[in-house]
Image: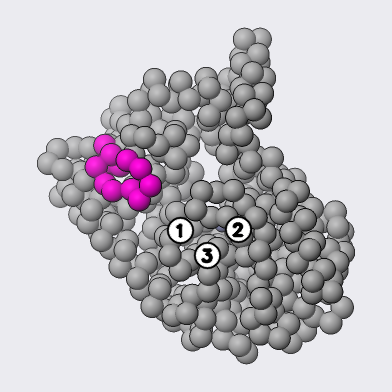
Amino acid sequence: MEIVPGLHQIRTPMNTPGLSYVMPYVFEDGDGVTLFDAGYGTNEATAAMTDALAELGHRPADIRRLIVSHAHPDHLGMAGWVKEQAPDSELIMLEREWQWIRHRWLDFQHWEDQSNAWLIRHGIAKSEVEAADRAGAIGLGGALSSPRGLKRLIGSAIGRLRNGNPDRHWRRSFRMDIEPDRVLQDGEILEFGDFVLQAVWTPGHTPGHLCVYEPNHRLMLTGDHVLPRITPNVSMHIDDEEGGRSPLAEYMDSLAKTARFDARCGLPAHEWDIEDLPGRCNELIQHHEERLEEVRLGIGDGAATASDVSGRVHWNTRPFEEFSIWQKRSALGETLSHLEVLRDQGRVRRFDDDKTRWECV
Ligand SMILES: [Zn+2]
């Protein structure tokens, strides 16, 4: 679909329940193209990219730049393939996102192992974490340290391949050896062809999430920061806790920042166009204000862990107890991002002994 002359919205497939495609954007500039987001690195997704470019009269080798909104595999996963097709193309992201990738994803094993202890500290039963670990659903902690562990690791890898564990999709489609050719700072301008793109740092969904604003056409490409129907996941994980980040506070500031641009339309990476971008930003702020109160009430009269609270608040998909451990980690991270803002506001207190617990003030 042509948004304005020379800017096209295309689709590449993904398999997440409720989200069947990613929407990369193709900017044409004379003899080449610039992409904003790409998609997974799967064969189906790269074939869809090749077809979409062909319809516009281009080849993958014509890609000159791939700008990514953030380092999740449905946005960045195709970067390795792009580099193979167009070796001189530039992979571009915000510097803050690159710092985050290096910290979390390049040593994902370490993060995942620590993350298991973190789940237990926040109230998930140790037996559940250990059972999931044995089944290969989360961390492979210690697997390489003994012959039995190694056997288990191989067994679980085969199990994952057979069962089509979503985790597998994530890992296999995410090239860890990518490195940006260029990193941007907030507010930096990229100019090519008839387009001027202003980098807009919008932390929250990830620490270095990037939106781009095109002032000539008053368009904001929003990545996963603002979506028209669903609320992006804003989670606090162990590295955020250690680094003193408050992802939800960052996210709400980023929404207010996005709403201040005079955009006539928001172009997200999923679902469909956002007609009233400031209106949608304010709706999301409102949603989180309400969720803050729901989370506070979820603490109840005594002290509660983040897992207790997660079990008492509403989730659109299923009750928390029925989530897989992978989903629980993400949901727990959401609850914690709200608890952290409540703490900042002086509405709740946090206690750390054998577990981390929260109490209303
Ligand atoms: Zn996404």
Residue 301 point in image, percent of width and height: 12, 41
Q: Residues within 10 Å of mark 3 (few under 14, many from 20)?
A: some
N-term mark: 2 or 1: 2
Q: How far separated are the C-alphas under marks 3 and 2?
A: 8 Å
The answer to whether residue 33 is above or below residue 48 is: below
Quarter for ligand 1?
Answer: bottom right
Mark 3 residue element: loop
The answer to whether residue 14 is above or below residue 134 is: below
Residue 117 point in image, percent of width and height: 44, 29
N-term mark: 1 or 3: 1
Contact, CB < 8 Å: mark 1 with mark 3? no
Residue type beneath disc 2: Tyr
Residue 113 point in image, percent of width and height: 53, 30
Q: Is residue 144 visible?
A: no
Q: Which mark is nearer the camera, 1 or 3?
A: 3
Q: Residue at x 45, y 21 (%)?
A: 130
Residue type beneath disc 1: Pro
Q: Residue at x 64, y 18 (%)?
A: 155
Quarter of the image containing the N terminus?
bottom right
Q: Which residue position is annotated with label 2?
A: 21
Residue farthest toward the top in the current orientation of the protein: 147
Residue 324 point in image, percent of width and height: 44, 34
Q: How far separated are the C-alphas under marks 2 and 1?
A: 15 Å
Q: Which residue position is annotated with label 1?
A: 232
Colour scheme in use: one colour
Q: Is residue 230 visible?
A: yes
Front-lying residue, 247 or 18: 18
Q: Give the label on residue 119, or none.
A: none
Region rendered in magenta: 308-319
Q: Which mark is nearer the camera, 2 or 1?
A: 2
Q: Residue at x 74, y 87 (%)?
A: 194
Residue 255 painted magenta = no
